[in-house]
Image (cartoon, grey):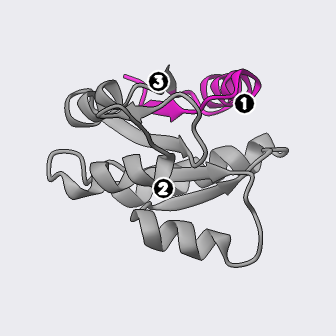
Amino acid sequence: MAQRILIVEDDPINIRYMQVVLTRKGGYEVSVSEDVQEILRMAKDDGLSAIIMDVSLTNSQWNGEKVDGVFITRMLKADAASASVPVMLATAHAMSGDREKFLRDSGADGYLSKPIHDPDAFIKAVREVVDKAK
């Protein structure tokens, strides 16, 4: 059975690119969601191998408030039922110091700079996070 990756992303082009690379090059099964309740449920119940989480989300809300990927990652890491699922933050905010700040603030397990240009490096980064969590 293929390992499952959840993509939490609001840009359709990024979603499509990641889906194609993860399925064709990585052999992963891929799901996509921006719905916070669905993300939390999937992390607890669906046997995910990893979550790729966009930092800047436009459509995600929790209790009527707009939330970002850092907030959702903190929620996942604070719940014992989902804390072990590795989360990779993906962001175009790639300024010096951003990586460390996002990882520290969220508790995420990895970081990807967008746009993703190198499919092999993308798959390698995902595999490293998935394998480290085993």
- Residue 47 point in image, percent of width and height: 27, 32
Residue 33's disc is 3
Precedes in sequence: disc 3 or disc 2: 3
Q: Which residues are magenta?
A: 1-28
Residue ID at (53%, 57%): 128
Question: Disc 1 marks which residue?
Answer: 14
Judge whether residue 134 can be spotted in this image.
no
Q: Classify residue 1 by image quadrant.
A: top left
Judge whether residue 40 can be spotted in this image.
yes
| Disc 1 to disc 2, C-alpha distance | 20 Å
Classify 10 Å Cα crowding around label 1: few (below 14), some (14-19), many (20 and above). some
The type of residue carrying mark 1 is Asn
Residue ID at (40%, 52%): 71
The type of residue carrying mark 2 is Val
Compared to residue 107, the image places residue 52 above or below, namely above
Q: Classify residue 27 by image quadrant.
A: top right
The type of residue carrying mark 3 is Ser
